Image: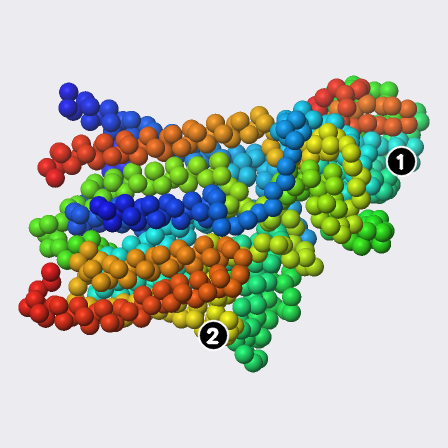
Amino acid sequence: MIKAVFFTVLTLVFFFIIWFYNPFVHRETYQVPREHMAIINDYSKYAKEGRELFQQNCQACHSVRYDSMYLSSAEANPNMSALKEKYGKVLPRNVYEASFHSDLMALKESFGKVPPDLSTAYLSKGPQYLYAFILEPQKVLPGTSMPAVMEGRPEETAKIVAYLRSVSEPSPQEKNKRTLMGFITIGYLIFMGILLFLWRKKKLKEMGL
Amino acid sequence: MLGRIGRWIDERGKFSDLWRSQMVEYKVPKNLTFPYAFGIMAIVALVIQIVSGIFLTMYYKPDIHLAFDSANYTIMKEVPFMWLIRHIHAAGANFFLAVVYLHILTGIYYNAYKKPRELTWIVGWAIYFVLLMTALSGYLLPWGQLSYWGMVVTTEIPTSIPGVIGETISVWMKGGYELGQITLGRFFGLHIWLLPLILLGLVSLHLYLVRANGISNPDGVEIDKKKEGVPFHPYITLKEGAYVMWYLAIFFFFVFFHMSHFLPADNYEPADPFKTPPHIAPEWYLLAFYTIFRSIPDKFLGFVVFNLALVLLLILPFLDFSPLRSAKNRPLFFIAFVILVISSIALTILGTMAPTPTNAMLGMIFTVGFIGFFLALPVISIVEWGWYKAKGGRNQ
Amino acid sequence: MEASRRDMLGLAIGGLSAIGIIGALYPFVKTLAPSASSLAGAVVEVDVSSIPEGQVRVVSWKGKPVFVVRLPQGFQWQGKAKQEANFKLLQGQDTYAMVAVCTHLGCVPLWKPQGEGEFNYPIFHCPCHGGFYTPWGDNVAGPPPRPLQLPPQKRDGNKLIIGEAGFVKELT
């Protein structure tokens, strides 16, 4: 009995550390003021505003391909509409990069590298980092070639992060649907397990075991 | 009507006879404990991986320019419900390996590898090895930063072998001097065809061997099946069926609510051969071996020792020749087992930490603990033979 | 009492298993449903002046080939169609769009401005099984059961807008 408890606890602690929270690994964290975090959390409401802000401040260098938003210079290119017609709203990466190679290379000339596409930036960086980095790039990543476009405009920065979130994450309604699905699935499985156990008990009694 | 169709089929297929002879008249020990259910959980995990994997191949594109978008746009956003199937596949891989590890540890604890089950153990080891290869090749497919750099590090490991051999193995794995389209294509083929087919064959063989030799016993005594056994169905099937339901409940908790560890953030950045991500470590199921490799200062020695750990696991049945069975009856073995478990856990967790000198030192200590378990087994066996003789050759 | 409770349990397990199997199949079946992008209503604009008179241009609308036909001024057609559904809808339009998918078995018909076989005037000919359509897509001869489908379309000056309701309100 003691052995069973010992091994169970050991197993649970182990999987907690590797699958939930690892206290031995230190990760950089950044603070977002509460009112701005509220904007990011209410992303479906601010997505449209954020999208416009993105177009004004970011689109010159960054694309969001999953939202069919490309570099301003590429969008102005007369080939763009034909490409979209042929390949769909979201151009395949190689098609996009080959078609607008000169635009991307011009950016590489001035910034040292091609500014990344931000379709999955929210998922890879998280809201805190994005907010802190867009607001003060040099402070978060010294030496970066990203200009401090949004300096002194924290609320608008939060709206841009909200827009990036709306591109990466499903809408709140969809999320609620998924949560409900999860609860039903888990509830069903637990209940089914209990029923099987009860049935087994009955059956064994009949068999005299 | 349905009954008549059923009878028609049964008269020809003899399925009810098969069921009776294989499920009801098949007798197993009455005292099987909870850990015996890890085997069936692993089979369930395999089925889940195969079904979800087949659906993923419908939309995944094994092309270095398109792979990332096919995984993160087409699958996650465009095709209805594919996000769920990708979540299931990603979480399923981790759960598969988790239950396989628990299954291996159960086997060690109850000495399920002893005569006549050595071959079962060896086939099981092969399953484990192929499973690691499958997981490794599958991890490359999304072509994110972690996929890419994880594979870079993996394909660099053979270069620890001095001389031209290591270099050649590394280049052959990649199909060139760097990771590219050729590498992705070959790992895709291996991941979806060759390795799963080998896995299915090995699992069938493993199951056949389990049936042929009978299930082992937590008490370490073989039962007289006629008298003491209980029918496999419904005694075990329903019990383990319930366990499987609860296992799946935990699994789906992760699938719906906690995917951040199975689809890690860094892998949402497309692979960039010019920039290594700051936190680069293998997946948790490889970390123990990785830490062994990393902690030993000499690269080639590290390579030898972590391969030795795998080989020792393979030849475990021959290292342990004690007449006693099951850790329940073997206090010395129990202590060694606890050291093994603690060492494995410590090695895994050390692997997630930064490679500081202190951690390297700790890594060495736990490597000794891990390898020590296997090397101590012959000694323990000799001591236990002494006890066995002194007690007059009786088992307990 | 005993027996009925056991039956209840058995029934519950049976019923719930059936629900569980359906539930497990549901997402897999749903993945086969049309994806988000294919459901999006596409709008295609065609510049009418770029098509020579009496010619046909093929454009893509919602992934389907669509004929944009521009008739010459004062065009008269000598043949006789089995139906006149399309003709009635398209009357008075010199340029219009039709889904270029034969209503028989889905091939793409060919535009024969000089005629084909017994028909010595402009006609659409489907090469697969010998179906014939008028320039307005009404079936003339052969196996096609009904006229070619017309997408919703609108005329705006020199532009034909396919995908928006205009002189054709919705897909026929």
| Residue B40 located left or right of residue A126 | left
Residue at 55 percent of width and 49 percent of height: A26
Mark number, residue A152: none
Residue at 68 percent of width and 57 percent of height: B275
Density class for disc 2 (Cα within 10 Å; few <14, some 14-19, many ≥20) is: some
Q: Amino acid at mark 2?
A: Leu
Q: How many marks?
A: 2
- Between marks 1 and 2, how big is the CA–CA gap? 75 Å
Q: Measuring from the top left, give residue C7's x and y in whole percent.
A: 21, 25
Chain designation of label 2: B
Mark number, residue C51: 1
Chain designation of label 1: C
Q: Which residue is mark 2?
A: B301
Do callouts 1 and 2 mark residues in contact (Cβ within 8 Å)?
A: no
Residue A54, placed above or below residue A98: above
Viewer-closest of A42 and B5: A42
Q: Measuring from the top left, give residue B43's x and y in whole percent.
A: 36, 49
Residue B241, placed above or below residue C162: below
| Residue B154 located left or right of residue A196 | right
Residue B360 visible in image: yes
Residue at 22 percent of width and 45 percent of height: A1
Q: Measuring from the top left, give residue B178's x and y in whole percent.
A: 65, 66
Residue B280, placed above or below residue A74: below
Q: Measuring from the top left, give residue C15's x and y in whole percent.
A: 32, 28
Residue at the far front in the pictured view: B358
**Label 2 secondary element:** helix
Viewer-closest of C102 and B278: B278
Residue at 16 percent of width and 24 percent of height: C3
Residue at the far left in the pictured view: B392
